[in-house]
Image: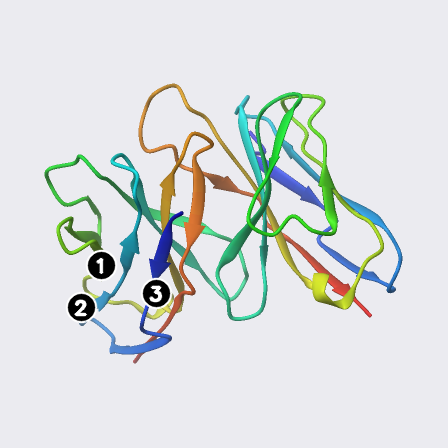
Amino acid sequence: AQKITQTQPGMFVQEKEAVTLDCTYDTSDPSYGLFWYKQPSSGEMIFLIYQGSYDQQNATEGRYSLNFQKARKSANLVISASQLGDSAMYFCAILSGSARQLTFGSGTQLTVLP
Amino acid sequence: NAGVTQTPKFRILKIGQSMTLQCAQDMNHNYMYWYRQDPGMGLKLIYYSVGAGITDKGEVPNGYNVSRSTTEDFPLRLELAAPSQTSVYFCASSQDYGQVPYEQYFGPGTRLTVT
């Protein structure tokens, strides 16, 4: 079974500063993928970034980067130059298994302050 | 492309009523999923399907049923609705051509209240 732990229920960051959202995972599968999704107050799930378990380099997508430390089983999301529109709930998820199932963490509510 | 569509967007059910949440995707994806999201929580997998005619239980299947007669459609049936089923329901789909990142595309969600 897979497990995702997000230990920060809420985070605050000043506009234009960087912020790191923590995620640790547990899985017995040798091959897996780690995802971050953003859920604004409107409710939709927005895919942000992906990291494969065999990827040698950390994933980056614009202002988002994933700090992947395989030995520590952590996959932290770094948002650089925060914007007011980044205020949302952020979910870390792990994908594994033959059915490509996603297991989600409980989320971190990020608030960007002007 | 419409992507993943879900109907209805909102629904209020009385205890004991039944309903079907509709989900359709036009991306020819073989994998489809149903999740529920309780307030302040992450998503939990209810059922999934790896292709037409093949379905299987996820983490929280009790009180639900699914069918997958076509590649496009994956309806979720609630029988004898209970207040514990008050939640937001998301349908998702993905494809596996052996490529990464197996991204799951989510529908907009159905907000269900059982009173």
Which labelled disc corresponds to residue A86?
Answer: 3
- Residue sitting nearer the eye, A19 or B89: B89
Q: Which kind of residue does numbered mark 3 sit on?
A: Asp
Contact flag, marks 1 and 3 (Cβ < 8 Å): no
Color theme of the render: rainbow
Closer to us: mark 1 or mark 3? 1
Measure the C-alpha gap from mark 2 to mark 1: 13 Å
- Do the dots labelled 2 and 1 sit on one chain? yes
x 67%, y 43%: residue: B6
Q: Amino acid at mark 1?
A: Asn
The picture places residue B51, in percent across and down from the top left corner, at 58, 22
| Chain holding disc 1 | A
* Mark sitting on residue A18: 2
Q: CA distance from mark 1 to mark 3?
A: 16 Å
> The C terminus of chain A is located in which quarter?
bottom left
Residue depicted at 22% across the width and 39% down the height = A53
Which residue is pictured at 86% across the width and 51% down the height?
B18
Residue B96 horizontal/vertical position (percent): 42, 24
**Quadrant of the image occupied by residue B88:** bottom right
Give the letter of the chain under mark 3: A
* Residue position for label 1: A76
- The residue located at (60%, 34%) in the rendering is B56
